[in-house]
Image: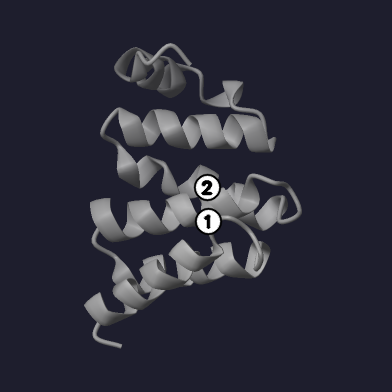
């Protein structure tokens, strides 16, 4: 929360059990991984949040963030497109719905679909 992501990453690696299976902790763990230059480690907590807590207000933003990580950092456009579609499905009238559609189209084009 203080922006010391590298130190937070080291602490997270030491204390894997410290991340509770609740939306807030899963999102925080994903942010720490992502912002400390470990984007591949952000995927699991984001997927877990989306899968286990689809009705939580953070589910759609988590799916959108997952799409960004997969598209921009991990170069996995097909998986990214699916994540953006999930963001829209979870909150079809939400603030991210239109952006998610645009990103989904972009990801599908990058994938050659």
In the visual, does 45 lie left or right of 55? left
Lower sequence index among marks 1 and 2: 2
Task: State which mark lies toward you, 1 or 2.
Answer: 1
Q: Residue at x 30, y 18 (%)?
A: 6
Which numbered dot is residue 46?
Answer: 2
Q: Nearer the viewer, residue 100 or 75?
A: 100
Q: Locate the C terminus and report the quarter of the image it occupies.
A: bottom left
Q: Quadrant of residue 94?
A: bottom right
In the visual, does 90 lie left or right of 7? right
Count how many numbered circles sit on residues in the image. Answer: 2
Which numbered dot is residue 63?
Answer: 1
Secondary structure of the residue carrying numbered label 2: helix
Look at the picture and state if 32 lies above or below 102: above
Residue lying farthest right? 55
Q: Quadrant of residue 108?
A: bottom left
Residue 33 on image: x %, y %: 38, 33
Q: Nearer the viewer, residue 68 or 30?
A: 68
Look at the picture and state if 67 lies above or below 109: above
Q: Nearer the viewer, residue 86 or 30?
A: 86
Residue 41 on image: x %, y %: 38, 41
Distance between mark 1 and mark 2 Cα atoms:
7 Å
Secondary structure of the residue carrying numbered label 1: helix
> Pointer 1 and pointer 2: residues touching (CB < 8 Å)?
yes
Q: Residues within 10 Å of mark 2 (few under 14, many from 20)?
A: many
Q: Residue at x 41, y 28 (%)?
A: 32
Look at the picture and state if 45 lies above or below 24: below
Look at the picture and state if 78 lies above or below 55: below
Residue 3 on image: x %, y %: 37, 16
Structure colour scheme: one colour
């Amino acid at each position: 929360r203080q922006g010391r992501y590298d130190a937070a990453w080291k602490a997270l690696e030491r204390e894997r059990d410290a991340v509770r299976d609740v939306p807030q902790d899963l999102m925080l763990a994903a942010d720490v991984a992502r912002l400390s230059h470990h984007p591949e480690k952000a995927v699991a907590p984001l997927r877990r949040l989306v899968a286990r807590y689809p009705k939580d207000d953070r589910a759609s933003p988590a799916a959108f963030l997952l799409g960004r990580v997969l598209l921009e950092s991990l170069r996995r456009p097909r998986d990214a497109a699916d994540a953006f579609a999930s963001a829209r499905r979870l909150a079809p009238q939400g603030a991210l719905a239109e952006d998610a559609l645009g990103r989904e189209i972009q990801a599908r084009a990058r994938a050659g679909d």
